Image (cartoon, grey):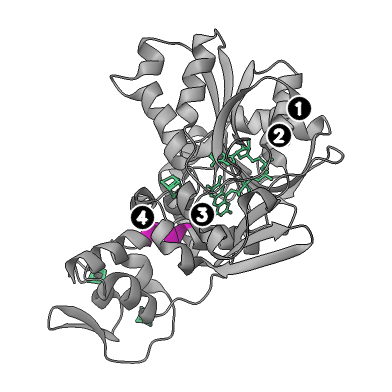
Amino acid sequence: MPIDPICKSRVLPDSQYSTEYGGETYYFCCPHCKSKFEELEKGTIRLKRSLADHERISFGKLRKEIIKPGICTLCGACASTCESITIDNNQPKLIGKCTACGVCYNQCPRTITTEEGLIGKIRYAYGASTQIKDLKGQDGAVVTSMLAYALEEGLIDCAIVTVKSEEEPWKPLPMVATTYDELVQSAGSIYSHSMTMEALMSAIKQGMRSIAFVGPSCNIDAVTKMQKSPYGFLHLFMRANILKLGLFCMDTFYYEGIREFVNSKDMRLEEIDFMKIRKGKFEFYIDDEIRSFDLSEFDEYRSTSCSYCTDMAAENADISFGGVGTPEDWTTVLARSGMGYEIFNEAVDSGYIKSRDLNKNEMDRVLNLSRMKKVQMYGLNKRKVA
Ligand SMILES: Cc1cc2nc3c(=O)[nH]c(=O)nc-3n(C[C@H](O)[C@H](O)[C@H](O)COP(=O)(O)OP(=O)(O)OC[C@H]3O[C@@H](n4cnc5c(N)ncnc54)[C@H](O)[C@@H]3O)c2cc1C
Ligand code: SF4
Ligand code: SF4
Ligand code: SF4
């Protein structure tokens, strides 16, 4: 029998007072306990979850991310919560033993420490992989499988996806996909900007009204702005229901830059079967061979806009997908809106996708990558000032 987290009394599971949070349902004895929980306990649970069992956080992390880049506001929160810290010469300094309790880091107004602050609002987090025979994707082919389910069930008229140009190999080409074969063609990641909005507009002009849209956060944000801003094209002039499937993203590279790099290493784009970025390496697969290069070698080809982007997890999507966290051939899935959650789970129930809960280590890897993306702006500003 569930226990009311506020008054600790036992309640019936069919209590009319319940709320969902972090994938769990909480039950209450009365509306008073429920509203108290909503006011107080959610924040506490979130903070405890982010602190409990986390990697140990020392003063060094606060120094590296906040103090050294010069974005400390000298509010004194760190010093006031730890006797080992003092403010000296306009800087917080360690003057005693640091037990790596993480309190200073978690009090600082300039750090981002909650799950929601790092990856946006989520309903549920999964590890997932396709159940469709012979379908190959970038990771678990879950994006393509969910689109296949939605298309075959008639939930969407089309999907806005990205395929490789036939004329210029590995150049991203946005496409309005209306068949399973076209979806299969789009599976996999192309690490350059794709002008997906063009295809979205074209689909709407063709009269399509239920549309799935795939892209990283900058693309998802374009759709969201068109839906929500006072001048939003999509709610003022054109009406369409759009299911936004976001892709995790740390960077993209200019197509011409990737081509130049590949040529300089005696490879040709047309012979590359697959590209993957992982663990600081850019990998190129040619037949059975993998050529792997340090990602820093691509710095000069990185899209400048990506240095200003702080949203790794596509926070405005209905559902987001990435490779980080889960093992090879699996996709990390963050279900956000009711629509994203429902359609994903229907695809699971219908046998298109297998899924399980994302475990804590996997979620930590997602949070860490997202934290890197959020704090990179600080480093960038530091370089500008220097
Ligand atoms: C530019 C880029 C950078 C990424 N960086 C990261 C990262 O740093 N960390 C991480 O964990 N995951 C990253 N991802 C996401 C990851 O590569 C996979 O897309 C995701 O895990 C889904 O895998 P899947 O096998 O389920 O998808 P699949 O079933 O293979 O489907 C992939 C979908 O991505 C779409 N797509 C491919 N390229 C583009 C593009 N350039 N623009 C818009 N849509 C595209 C295709 O249309 C297709 O619908 C990135 C993806 C892209 C496109
Ligand atoms: S608050 Fe904790 S982590 Fe920060 S300096 Fe003090 S002991 Fe170290
Ligand atoms: S809590 Fe953060 S912003 Fe405030 S003084 Fe310490 S480091 Fe600076
Ligand atoms: S890093 Fe940000 S701006 Fe760059 S492609 Fe990815 S989502 Fe877009």
What residue is shown with label 3? 258
- The secondary structure type at the circle numbered 3 is helix
**What is the crowding at mark 3: few (fewer than 14 residues within 10 Å), some, or many (at least 20)?**
many
The reply to whether callout 2 and callout 3 are in contact (CB within 8 Å) is: no
Q: Measuring from the top left, give residue 51's x and y in whole percent.
A: 49, 66
Q: Measuring from the top left, give residue 42's x and y in whole percent.
A: 47, 48
Residue 307 disc label: 4
Residue at (44% x, 78% y) in the render: 101
Q: Measuring from the top left, give residue 84's x and y in whole percent.
A: 30, 86
- The secondary structure type at the circle numbered 2 is helix
Q: Quadrant of the C terminus?
A: bottom left
Left or right side of 194 for 284 = right
Residue at (70% x, 24% y) in the render: 150
Closer to the eye: label 3 or 4:
3
Q: Quadrant of ligand 1?
A: top right
Q: Check disc 3 and give the amino acid type.
A: Ile
